[in-house]
Image (cartoon, coloured by chain):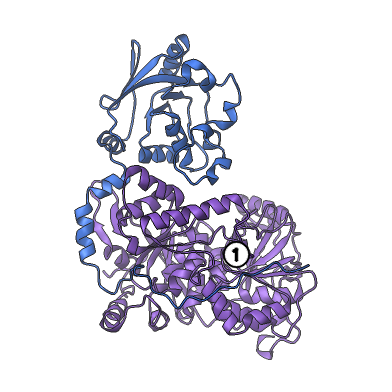
Amino acid sequence: MGTTLAEKLWTSHLVRKGEDGAPDLIYIDLHMCHEVTSPQAFEGLRLAGRPVRRPDLTIATEDHNTPTLDIDLPIADETSRIQINTLRSNAEECGVRIHSLGDADQGVVHVVGPQLGLTMPGMTVVCGDSHTSTHGAFGSLAFGIGTSEVEHVLATQTLPLKPFKTMAINVNGELPEGSTAKDIILAIIAKIGTGGGQGYVLEYRGDAIRALSMEARMTVCNMSIEAGARAGIIAPDQTTFDYVQGRPHAPEGEDWDAAVEYWKTLVTDEDAVFDTQVDLDASDLEPFVTWGTNPGQGLPLSANVPNPDDIADEVDREAAANALEYMGLTPGTPLREIAIDTVFLGSCTNGRIEDLRAAAEIIQGRTKAEGVRFLVVPGSARVRLQAEAEGLDKVFIDFGAEWRNAGCSMCLGMNPDQLRPQERSASTSNRNFEGRQGKGGRTHLVSPLVAAATAVRGTLSSPADLVDAPAALV
Amino acid sequence: MEKFTTHTGVGVPLRRSNVDTDQIIPAVYLKRVTKTGFDDALFAAWRGDSEFILNQDAYKNGSVLVAGPDFGTGSSREHAVWALKDYGFKVVIASRFADIFRGNSGKQGLLAAVVSQENIELLWKLLDAEPGKEITVSLEDRTVTCGELTVPFEIDDYVRWRLMEGIDDIGLTLQHEEDITAFEATRASWRPQTLPAKHLPSVHIEAARPVEA
């Protein structure tokens, strides 16, 4: 019997097989750090007198806490300032490469790794952040870890792990125009639930996945964690190789040829068996938006706010009722009529250049709805530079959007970019939990296209809703 | 991690059940960047009460906590174990522990000893009768001794072995350092390294400013 891609990645990183119930020891190719989950790990190393085993496989950047305004001034919030200064001194002391605020390679850790060419197929990638699953888009085993594990990786470049189960998610058919990778993953989460992936590595397969660009594939893998899975992967192909080639850390010459030859073997064998299979037809997939307070509470944009009384499962019914109360929504209201206060375009889910281009194309020549705040936060400083080189910043600013510096920003509101109580957002980020974007804030997760159209109309909208929409979209 | 075979220290009777990790250390203390120095945060909400057991002179140097059932429930925060250790506790005795807390204890070298509630009551009586009385915990014999009373405790064999050897997870992994080094020798040359750093040329990043309302 053949093996799955996930099993191949596991086996190729097996340092030592666990005996008598002990876990396997797995080698880690790339460890990324940020300011929030790393300080106690570095402190632990210091207390134990242990060095960082492989500074040359470690990289740090500042993202969770960083302000997106006035980045040349001292950080106003004391906690954030201390955490960032701690990361800087830890990096210096341990010889770890760091990209700080103001550096052209600073940005959200999951945007920075791929753009530097540090993320490539066939690797194991970890970070003290659950959205590390993003890097699985390259055909790598990538997952988030806790602070003790961060310390473990710093000290040993390995992790003791128990094997996981495998789930194939087959997405077939051609994605309609106006629907995106974000809609695919929101539909998958709505289908299998926020706990559906627990204990599994998800492998996204099928025509619709193969047709996605690298950045779109990252959007899909990014939200694997929202389905409860620790990791999501997509087998590498020519799209992957083309994206990696020429990036700063991409292999060159003979190394490149050897790498590609190996990467081409990174597929699930035809006779391999997954523990579970899920199918999704992309050909009739509408733009998806969430109405509740977990990412599984999503529906096509043409639907109405659900009535909890119609939900058979008692636990789901109560969760829906609680969510609607928090969100301030009435059952039966068309989702398209929900008025939005703030649109957030950014995050490790949708903060890359293609996301900015897609949104800019929608708003160009149009007018922002009155009273709507539109925050555009590039995923990294390089993404910002690229957008400025293409003139996208002007498109956003002329439209009335705020053009910000890179970081996690309003995705989790650890910096000043937060929703006020009861303020409602359409957000291209990944979590609509209560209070996630600010205490009392109400989040609707959307694609960049829906975010842009919503900023034009002021209510949840798709590009097809715009009066002067191109014929193909109507 | 220090090897743990036997520990003798002042026993502290904490006559409460369901002591959750929010009570052990409130969330407000999680913003710190250190792994030590949480001793003041331990039971922070209760420490303001002069009657609280750790505010009584006899128990100030306590190192063996004898608690009610279901100790360490709630949030998974590792800070709860750090706070107990920082205060000076080496052992927590209870009839039931929350799984995550027990796991975190094992990782950090804090002994979580499971003793029947019947025997916990006996220990509480002895400690109440003579505040500041010492307790001896033998991991080797799996016993708790207080004066004339000796009672057994339970602990997972694998965790016991690790504590007695003084091996934390990292220490355990480093026992296989030769395997790690051997594995590293097999890694292909195309696999990326972060150092020496490679990137596109540096460019000045213009700071965004607040939009005037």
Residue B134: image quadrant is: top left
Q: Quadrant of the N terminus of chain B?
A: top left
Residue B165: image quadrant is: top left
Which chain is assigned purple?
A
Q: Mark 1 lies on which chain?
A: A
Looking at the image, residue A326 sits to the left or right of residue A281; the answer is: right
Which chain is assigned blue?
B
Toward the viewer: B150 or A456? A456
Toward the viewer: A380 or B164? A380
Three-letter code, disc 1: Ile
Looking at the image, residue B125 sits to the left or right of residue A385; the answer is: left
> SS at mark 1?
loop
The residue identified by callout 1 is A71
**Would you say residue A30 is visible in this rendering?**
no
Q: In this view, does B53 lie above or below A354?
A: above
Q: Residue at x 71, y 71 (%)?
A: A460
Q: Which residue is drawn at 51% across and 22% down?
A: B54
Q: Which residue is drawn at 57% across and 75% down?
A: A384
